[in-house]
Image (cartoon, rainbow, N blue to C red):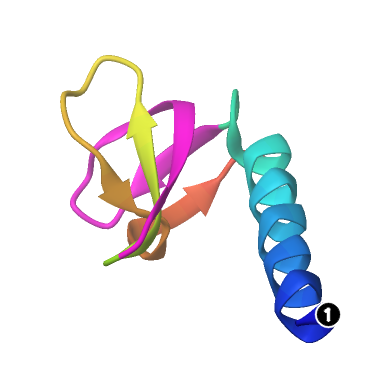
Amino acid sequence: MPSVKRHASNILHEYGEAQSELIGKAVVLTDGKAGTVQNVWLDELHGLRISIKGHDGRWPVSTIKVVES
């Protein structure tokens, strides 16, 4: 059981890191949508998904083409 707790802790840690790295950053997606990341979700079917201010919907982080540095 300790390894399961360690894995869960690692997942939550990485999720928190992704949130802090993406929320508030300007992004451009592969389909041309652009804007500021409002939120990050952990989707059990698709992994991390983001919402972009001014656009309805949630997109997989894999569709991010450019992130503000």
Determine the main secondary structure of the stretch shown in magenta. strand
- How packed mark 1 is, by other alpha carbons closer than 10 Å (few <14, some 14-19, many 20 or more), is few
- 36 within the magenta span: yes
Horizontal side of residue 65 vs 57, given as left or right: right
Q: Which residues are magenta?
A: 26-44
Q: Residue furthest top?
A: 54
Q: Residue furthest front?
A: 1
Q: Is residue 26 above or below residue 63?
A: above
Q: Which quadrant holds the N terminus?
A: bottom right
**Position of residue 13 measured from the top left corner of the image (x, y, whole percent):** 77, 55
Residue positioned 76% across, 70% down in the render:
5
Residue positioned 22% across, 45% down in the render:
32
Horizontal side of residue 65 vs 22, given as left or right: left
Quadrant in the rendering for residue 51? top left
Quadrant in the rendering for residue 63? bottom left
**Position of residue 57 measured from the top left corner of the image (x, y, whole percent):** 18, 33
Horizontal side of residue 1 vs 59, given as left or right: right
Counting the numbered discs, the total is: 1
Q: Is residue 7 above or below residue 11?
A: below
Q: Which quadrant holds the C terminus?
A: top right
Helix, strand or loop at mark 1:
helix
Q: Is residue 62 above or below residue 32?
A: below
**Tag 1: amino acid:** Pro
**Position of residue 10 measured from the top left corner of the image (x, y, whole percent):** 76, 67
Residue positioned 39% across, 65% down in the render:
62
**Position of residue 44 measured from the top left corner of the image (x, y, whole percent):** 34, 62
| In front of the other: 43 or 58 | 43
Residue positioned 71% across, 44% down in the render:
16
Q: Residue tagged by mark 1?
A: 2
| In front of the other: 18 or 37 | 18
